[in-house]
Amino acid sequence: MGCVSLLLVLVCAVSVCAVRGLDKLNMCMDAKHHKTEPGQEGALYSQCSPWSSNACCRANTTEEAHADNSNLYNFNWNHCGIMADRCKKHFIQDTCFYECSPHLGPWIQQVDQSWRKERILDVPLCLEDCETWFSDCRDSFTCKQDWHTGWDWTEGINKCPAGATCRTFAEVFVSAKTMCEVIWSNSYRYTTLKKSSGRCMQLWFEGPTNPNLEVARSYLNHAPSQAIAMATTLLLPLLLSLLHAGISF
Ligand SMILES: *[C@@H]1O[C@H](CO)[C@@H](O)[C@H](O)[C@H]1NC(C)=O
């Protein structure tokens, strides 16, 4: 009888793991503007349109994502003079990716922040997306490496803190790796993986199919907790048959 209860508990645990695993492939983080569930949107604005078939963002969020000093976070791209359009388009894409992606589950972490309960950490970016972002921004100006913290917000938008001088991205960050990883306090992880690898997340892709679903799936299948769930799933029938054999004898 004890064995049967133990088995029941095991079976339940495995099914809970499996269900949560599925959710992690298609979910929205608990943050400032995200919908509670991903779903189709009629038409998302401009650069965010590839996410229209399944998105965590609403149309109005994507429109704001394209505006200077948008009301999303009151964040000012032009804190060291006007940011070049070829640079700004990467920040718009980054905003679309952050607000709209339904496939960031494997990298979502709880945080204790006033404006959100969850964040992303170490999302592996494709080499092309990080390198073009940096090369298109090399000659634009900023005064800080980490854009999440340390701004002067006294006037309602982010201004450079006292003592921080405006220099080019090339001077401030030096490398694409530092820029991609430090700018949003490790939301992203630099990789040397190409888009064709299917093992890195793409900021830029052509809709309507989102290639990041399969990337998330492969990461989830390689995660340690998932490995344990898989092993249990595979071992369970063996355990059951052994038990059955034991009872028969
Ligand atoms: C978008 O519209 C929804 C209501 O449909 C509203 O709750 C939300 O605050 C709006 N978001 C922005 C960024 O304006």
Image (cartoon, rainbow, N blue to C red):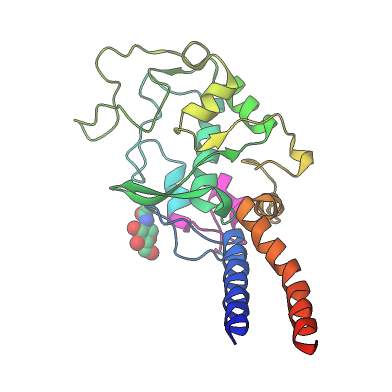
Seen at 69% across and 49% down, the residue is 215
Looking at the rendering, which quadrant does residue 7 occupy? bottom right
Q: Position of residue 196 (x, y in %)?
A: 79, 40
Tag count in the figure?
0
Seen at 36% across and 31% down, the residue is 76
Seen at 50% across and 34% down, the residue is 91
Q: Is residue 49 magenta?
A: yes
Q: Is residue 105 left or right of residue 61?
A: right
Q: Is residue 194 left or right of residue 58?
A: right
Furthest residue toward front? 249
Q: Nearer the viewer, residue 151 or 228?
A: 228
Q: Position of residue 28 (x, y in %)?
A: 50, 59
Q: Is residue 7 magenta?
A: no
Q: Nearer the viewer, residue 8 or 88?
A: 8
Give the residues in magenta. Answer: 41-60
Q: Is residue 101 left or right of residue 242?
A: left
Q: Position of residue 175 (x, y in %)?
A: 57, 17
Q: Taking 18 as reference, is 171 above or below it? A: above
Q: Is residue 110 left or right of residue 104?
A: left
Q: Position of residue 177 (x, y in %)?
A: 58, 24
Seen at 63% across and 36% down, the residue is 125
Q: Nearer the viewer, residue 94 or 86?
A: 94
Which quadrant of the picture is home to ligand 1? bottom left
> What is the quadrant of the C terminus in the image?
bottom right
Q: Taking 23 as reference, is 82 above or below it? A: above
> What is the quadrant of the N terminus in the image?
bottom right
The kind of secondary structure the magenta stretch mainly shows is: loop
